[in-house]
Image (cartoon, rainbow, N blue to C red):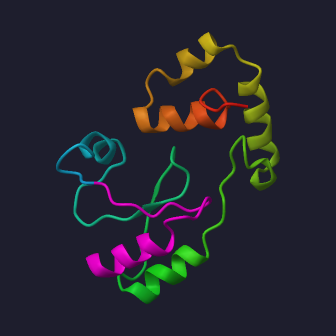
């Protein structure tokens, strides 16, 4: 599977909507893997960084490439057109919060998800 995965990484290297990446769960990536329920290797996850789902498809290049080509952006503060009414309401509520209030909500979130939340809410961007 590794050659197929590496080929896919290369194909999506400059894609601004889809990230295909490796995480070494035996080294620096171990906390991220633990937080996302990775127990065996290789494990493929996809979806919202705050709610990753297990990939259950084929492991050959054709199956992986087909799956990746069908991925769509998930709902987020920067992708509101992909949100349903409940998600839009949740985003609107969180956008009204102060930095301190947001900090209380995200204190328990893994650092990778924390950075994503702060970025998506505009706190880590020069806008």
The residue lying at 33 percent from left, 60 percent from top is: 22
Is residue 27 rendered to the left or right of residue 115? left
* Residue extending farthest bottom: 62
Give residue 32's quadrant in the image.
top left
Q: Quadrant of the N terminus?
A: bottom left
- Residue 23 percent coordinates (x, y): 31, 55
The residue lying at 79 percent from left, 35 percent from top is: 89
Task: Answer whether residue 28 is magenta in the image.
Answer: no
- Residue 95 percent coordinates (x, y): 74, 26
The answer to whether residue 27 is above or below residue 39 is above
The residue lying at 55 percent from left, 51 percent from top is: 48
Residue 110 in sight in this render = no
The residue lying at 49 percent from left, 31 percent from top is: 114
Residue 50 in sight in this render = yes
Q: Quadrant of the C terminus?
A: top right
The residue lying toward the viewer, choosing from 77 and 15, is: 15
* Residue extending farthest left: 26
How many numbered discs sit on the rendered protein?
Answer: 0
Chain part drawn in magenta: 1-23
* Residue extending farthest top: 100
- Residue 83 percent coordinates (x, y): 76, 50
Is residue 15 rendered to the left or right of residue 93? left
The answer to whether residue 82 is above or below residue 55 is above
Task: Answer whether residue 5 is magenta in the image.
Answer: yes
């Amino acid at each position: 599977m590794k050659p197929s995965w590496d080929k896919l990484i290369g194909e999506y290297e400059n894609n601004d909507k889809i990230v295909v990446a490796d995480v070494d769960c035996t080294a620096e990536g171990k906390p991220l893997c633990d937080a996302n329920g990775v127990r065996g290797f290789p494990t493929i996850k996809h979806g919202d960084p705050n709610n990753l789902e297990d990939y259950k498809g084929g492991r050959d290049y054709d199956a992986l490439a087909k799956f990746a080509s069908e991925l769509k952006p998930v709902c987020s503060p920067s992708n509101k057109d992909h949100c349903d009414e409940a998600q839009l309401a949740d985003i609107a509520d969180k956008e009204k919060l102060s930095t301190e209030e947001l900090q209380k909500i995200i204190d328990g979130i893994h650092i990778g998800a924390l950075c994503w939340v702060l970025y998506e809410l505009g706190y880590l961007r020069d806008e």
